[in-house]
Image: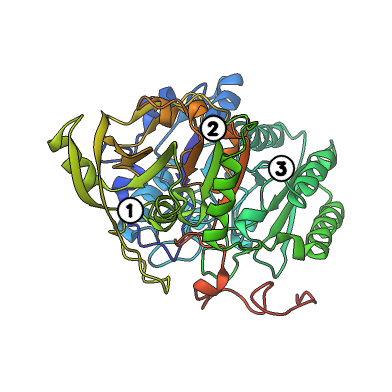
Amino acid sequence: MRIVIAQMSHETNTFSPVITDLARFSGASRSHPIEGQQAIEVFRGTETCMGGYIDVAEAIGAKITVPIAAGAPPSGPVEDDAYIYITKKIVEAADSNCDAIFLDLHGAIVTQSLEDGESQLLKKIRDVNPDVPIAVALDMHANIFDDIVSLSTVICGYHTYPHVDMYATAKRAGEILIAQGRQDVKPTMAWGNNPMLPHVMKQGTDDFPNKQLQERAKEVETNEVLSVSLFTGFPHADISQAGLSVVVTTDNDLALAEKVRDEFLDVAWEQRAAWVYEIEPLDDSITRARRLGENPSREGPIIILDHYDNTASGGTMDTTDVLKEVLRQELEDVAVCGIFDPEAVDLMEKVGVGNEISLSLGGKLPMPAIARANSPISITGRVKTLSDGRFPTTIAMGRGLMTHMGKTAVLSVGQIDIMVVSRHFEPVDPGCFRSVGIEPNQKRFLMLKSRIHYRVGFRDLASEVVECAGLGVCTSDYNEISFSNVRRPIYPLDGVNTRIS
């Protein structure tokens, strides 16, 4: 049996100015995404979708073909030539000698020309191999279109946010497809969506209502219901079908699939107010953090969460509003991860460790989608550390892979250590600090450019978390961005209390 396993994964923030070219899919030191045996070796044994798929295929002795493994950090719309390169690789492998396809997709890829890149890939596959069974693993933040369901054999989505079940999700999808090949099951899917754009900061599966909904989804996944996927959607994509949706797969029982789908859609809609994030003024947040830091009985660092500028949602990672407020209020014993500014890193490298430097930090990437300006901060400090920015990922999210921050420098400004990086990444693993000689447990404050994923590595370290409304294209204030293409009316953009089918 020949199985094609391929990855095309990108969460597109249509408001982001960060360019998404082929190089962004290619890693820190490559010109093209990996493929073939190299990809198998990189992902085998990892807690990833690709790792799950490889294990399923190898368990049945299948011959594996990996035409490409292309994953990029969230950013702006994918350039057309990059999308064409990636899809061509996959489609060429999906020929008549292919018995099954396992796809590691995201579900929210938007290109310069397409608002639904996944469906267009599936159409191209069906053109060359109309009947091939296709399993699709999707991120919880997928924005579902009809074609991605109708052109797939089975779809499974993550049950966790932070995402720690990528391996299990792909394994579930792959095993359902193998069972279909043995004629043990007949996957039958039903899907639907609600006119609602849940705020990302309210989508965590530690929190109501997504916690209860995902727990219910796992409970319903019995022998009759093969998979229940509640997709919270990615609201920073100004496309028609952005928002919450549900895909249910049963064993040849469409009525049951529709019944379960409607149960989840109904509950999510009834709880729609709980998906709306309430914003606190930035100066109030930092004042609260400072007061928490004065508590002598505090155990563990206080996390200052700069969630408006999260790389893993398409943020530039170079906005400085939260850092400016931290400096203005004179917080002490702070470690910051991090500011994306390759130019500043180069300057610090030239100056050398131990020497003082004055520079303009961050604020270099314009954000025309946001009304407020992205401005740098003029700062003077001492170069504390220089690093290649590489460390092994040890947390549940991505365990077995290497994290690449790019060339990294630490700038010490008084009692604040600022990590300045050359590659976009989200600080979810405490190893990001340890790799540059900072022990996070010993800091009073840790400032992180993250949203929800930080919880995997930092939740057990932190004594408190203070969420800060800074500046960025991941804003939790929908009034700061303009939606022109999303279907309307939609909650909470519009005052709707009735679903319109």
* Residue named by callout 2: 48
Which of the numbered marks, if any, corresponds to residue 82?
1
Camera-side mark, 1 or 2 = 2
Residue 483 locus on image (x, y percent):
53, 75
**Residue position for label 3:** 206
Q: Amino acid at mark 3?
A: Asp
SS at mark 1 in the image: helix
Amino acid at dot 2: Thr
In the picture, which quadrant includes the C terminus?
bottom right
Q: CA distance from mark 1 to mark 2?
A: 23 Å
Quarter occupied by residue 279: bottom right
- At x 42%, y 30%, the residue is 433
* Residue shown at the point (76%, 65%) measured from the top left: 273
Q: In the image, 302: left or right of 425?
A: right
Pinpoint residue 400: horizontal percent, then vertical percent: 48, 23
Residue at 65% from the left image edge and 47% from the top image edge: 153
Q: Earlier in the sequence, mark 3 or mark 1?
A: 1
Q: Position of residue 492 (x, y in %)?
A: 68, 72
**Res 470 label:** none
Relative to 187, is 143 on the left or the right?
A: left
Decide which of 142, 385 is in the foreground and name it: 385
Mark 2 or mark 3, whichever is nearer to me: 3
| Alpha carbons under labels 2 and 3: distance apart | 21 Å
Label 1 with label 2: CB-CB less than 8 Å: no
Residue in front for this viewpoint, 392 or 102: 392
- Residue 294 left/right relative to 438: right
Q: Secondary structure at mark 2?
A: loop
- Please name the colour scheme applied to the rendered image: rainbow
The amino acid on which the numbered mark 1 sits, given as a three-letter code, is: Ala
Residue 251 is at least partly visible in this image = no
Left or right: 191 in relation to 96: right
